[in-house]
Image (cartoon, rainbow, N blue to C red):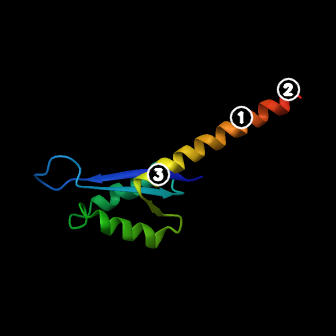
Amino acid sequence: MSYIYNLYSSEEGHFGISHACHIKCDLPPHKFRSILMEYRRDNELRTDIEAFIKYMQGTFSSFRLFDYDDTIQFDADQENSTILANLLDEINRTV
């Protein structure tokens, strides 16, 4: 099963989001969060999203970055697949 995560960063003294990453990988939320928390404990790397992404890409083969539009399309495709599967199940029950 694949999961989608969104990482946001803002520079110190900067209001709002300065950088956003949309990620798809096979890591469940509790594992992704624990890796991210452990990574943030390192004082030098704590705010460097690019270094975290490079680490994740090198460590997990399922790790993939998305553009925002791709993420929305992925969610829509997943929802449409679920709707179609439910409709097909309903047709099979009534025939």
Q: Secondary structure at mark 2?
A: helix
Q: Position of residue 94 (x, y in %)?
A: 85, 26
Badge 2: residue crowd in 10 Å (few <14, some 14–19, many ≥20): few
As shown in the figure, which amino acid type bears the numbered disc 2? Answer: Thr
Look at the numbered discs 2 and 3 and tell me whether their residues touch, using CB distance below 8 Å.
no
Q: Nearer the viewer, residue 24 or 58?
A: 24
Q: Residue furthest top?
A: 94
Earlier in the chain: of badge 1 and badge 3, it is 3
CA–CA distance in space, label 1 to label 2: 13 Å
Q: Is residue 4 left or right of residue 90?
A: left
**Which residue is the site of mark 2?**
94
At horizontal 73% and vertical 33% (from top left) the residue drawn is 87
Q: Position of residue 18 (x, y in %)?
A: 22, 55
Amino acid type for the residue under numbered disc 1: Asn
What is the C-alpha distance between the residues marked 1 and 3? 23 Å
Return the residue found at the far bottom: 58
**Mark 1 surroundings: few (<14), some (14-19) or many (≥20) residues within 10 A:** few
Q: Which of the 4 image quarters holds residue 82?
A: top right
Q: Which residue is mark 1?
A: 86
- Name which of mark 1 and mark 2 comes first in the sequence: 1
Q: Position of residue 61 (x, y in %)?
A: 53, 69
Q: Are marks 1 and 3 in contact (CB under 8 Å)?
A: no
Mark 2 or mark 3: name the one nearer the start of the chain: 3
Amino acid type, mark 3 = Thr
In front of the other: 87 or 29: 87
Mark 1–mark 2 CB contact (< 8 Å):
no
To which residue does mark 3 refer?
71
Q: Is residue 18 left or right of residue 27?
A: left
Q: Is residue 5 left or right of residue 61?
A: left
Which quadrant does the C terminus fall into? top right
Q: Residue at the spot x=32%, y=62% of the render?
A: 39
Please state the horizontal and vertical placement of residue 76, each as a whole percent of the image: 54, 44
